[in-house]
Image (spheres, rainbow, N blue to C red):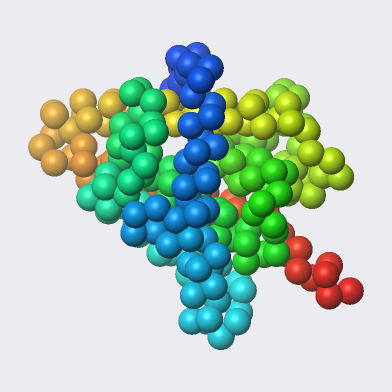
Amino acid sequence: MGMMKDRIAKEAGTRVVPSVASGYVRAVLDMAIDGVGPLRPVIETAGAKLASHGGDVEKAVASLVRSHTSLAGVQGFVTNIGGIALAPATVPANVVGVTIVQCHLVASIAHLRGYDLEDPRVRNAVLAVMLGEDTVAEMVKKKRLPSSPMALATSPVHDPLLDDRIAKEVTGELVGRTIGRRALMLAGKRIPLLGGAVGAGADGFGTWQVGRYAQSELRDRRLKRKR
């Protein structure tokens, strides 16, 4: 039942996304990579984690997943993270903030694993990870995506037409989250304090899922460079 509700929300979100909103997701990704508010640039964050774990990439990656999962659950942090002015009116500040945290996490993992964040193929892969494993699998099956995030990142050529398609799907995902969040808020009105607590927990869990998917999907490219 829960999966069905998620799918309905995502489909509804995709239907109401204005065509101009796809560029917003790219702007969010740019902000996340370059650093915004209390989030430092990805290169600095990833480098600091790597140094604090003695150069062990996988320990640094696991630490990034833990820290970003915690950040996503702090409502004051995600609401005031910055960059909210760029958001469509249909997407609330806390959803924007969580999205920035998740983009920052996935891009940090990609950087540590040896991907070039300036490469548009890699940026498409980062956004595809944001959709989640189940959504990506469904889109590949229906030929709405050509392949997995890993394959997108390592594709021999960049397909510019794919940029807008992925951006629209991620934007639809954000609006779908908004619809789901409003349902949680309504539930919270029936049970005092429930809405905020469940929302924060869902944000943290969702960020953990995104991080785990990035861990499994964006395999280490540095090994190939050593051969």
Q: Which residue shows up at 37% across the image and 42% down it?
A: 83
Q: From the viewer's perspective, is residue 127 above or below residue 154? A: above
Quadrant location of the N terminus?
Answer: top left
Is residue 213 left or right of 6 when viewed as pictured? right
Q: Residue at x 21, y 41 (%)?
A: 196
Look at the image and tell me whether residue 112 can be seen.
yes
Residue 71: where, in percent of width, then height? 34, 57
Pinpoint residue 110: horizontal percent, then vertical percent. 63, 58
Q: x, y percentage for residue 68?
A: 42, 59
Residue at the far right in the pictured view: 227
- Spot the residue most to the top: 15
**In the displayed structure image, the side of residue 138 where residue 223 appears, left or right:** right
Q: Is residue 52 left or right of residue 74?
A: right
**Residue 92, position as x, y percentages in the image:** 31, 32
User: In the shown orientation, is residue 143 left or right of residue 180?
Assistant: right
Could you say which quadrant of the image residue 123 lies in? Answer: top right
* 54 shown above or below 206: below
Q: Tell me if residue 206 can be seen.
A: no
Q: Nearer the viewer, residue 54 or 202?
A: 54
